[in-house]
Image (spheres, rainbow, N blue to C red):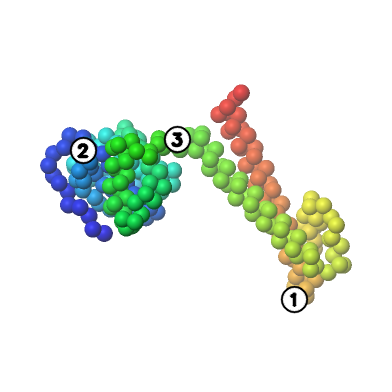
Amino acid sequence: MTSITPDNTPVSEVAGGVDTHQDTHTAAVIDPVGRVLGTEQFPATPAGYAALLAWMCIFGQPIRVGVEGTGAYGAGLTRLLQAERIAVIEIDRPYRKARRFQGKSDPIDAIAAAKAALAGDRTGTPKQRDGRIEALRTLRIARRSAVDQRADTQRQIKTLIVTAPDTLRLRGLTSTKLIATCAALTPDRDHAAGPLTATQIALRSLALRHQQLTAEIADLDELLHTLVTAINPG
């Protein structure tokens, strides 16, 4: 990637911008009147974040840094900058749409983020991602995943029931009774090549998975209830 050669003329205060991606971050530094002092790419790792900040400091004291994706790929860098008491400005991803016809370029995105941060344009304060609020968000992600997987599993069970032999006597059961009945099946694994036994094995496997996911959801609900109560006792 082409980078802009640093202008080593001393500047007391500078603003920065960072275009974040999963593997790399591209940074830009501008002076108080918006002149670009340099751009550079760094690995999206703890060592890369430290190197990025050290590079910015070559130009002067960063007073504001605009970061795209402070709640995603930019989360690690945001924590470092905030720990160094540098104001982090969240740059909206839609900001880049306004100039997409200029051509896709990480340095351009980084420069645009720096200028937006300096001007206070299309920016916001990064959401708090530490402590109990972050724990709540993380647990909710796990719960949502378990709920989605359980719903998929139940749909798969009902799909199998449609074509299952009538001898299984599974039609017309409530969802709760259906899951319990399928989980209690005892198919003869020696006859797994037969359609009836194969269906029983599949139904039992799916039902046990459904029960496991239900237990996970209940456990997460208990943790979430405790955490929500601690955050908002009222």
Q: Which residue is mark 2?
A: 33
**Toward the viewer: 170 or 193?**
170
Residue placed farthest to the left in the image?
9
At horizontal 75% and vertical 65% (from top left) the residue drawn is 160
Q: Which residue is mark 1?
A: 193
Q: In 3D space, how far apart are the residues under numbered discs 3 and 1 (Cα atoms)?
A: 55 Å
Q: Is residue 157 left or right of residue 56?
A: right
Query: Dot 2: few (<14), some (14–19), or many (≥20) neighbours within 10 Å?
Result: few
The disc placed on residue 128 is 3
Asked if the residue under mark 1 is in contact with the one under mark 2, i.e. CB atoms within 8 Å, the reply is no
Residue 125, horizontal then vertical, whole percent: 40, 35
The disc placed on residue 32 is none
Which comes before the other along the chain, label 3 or label 1? 3
- Tag count in the figure? 3
Residue type marked 1: Ala
**Toward the viewer: 189 or 161?**
161
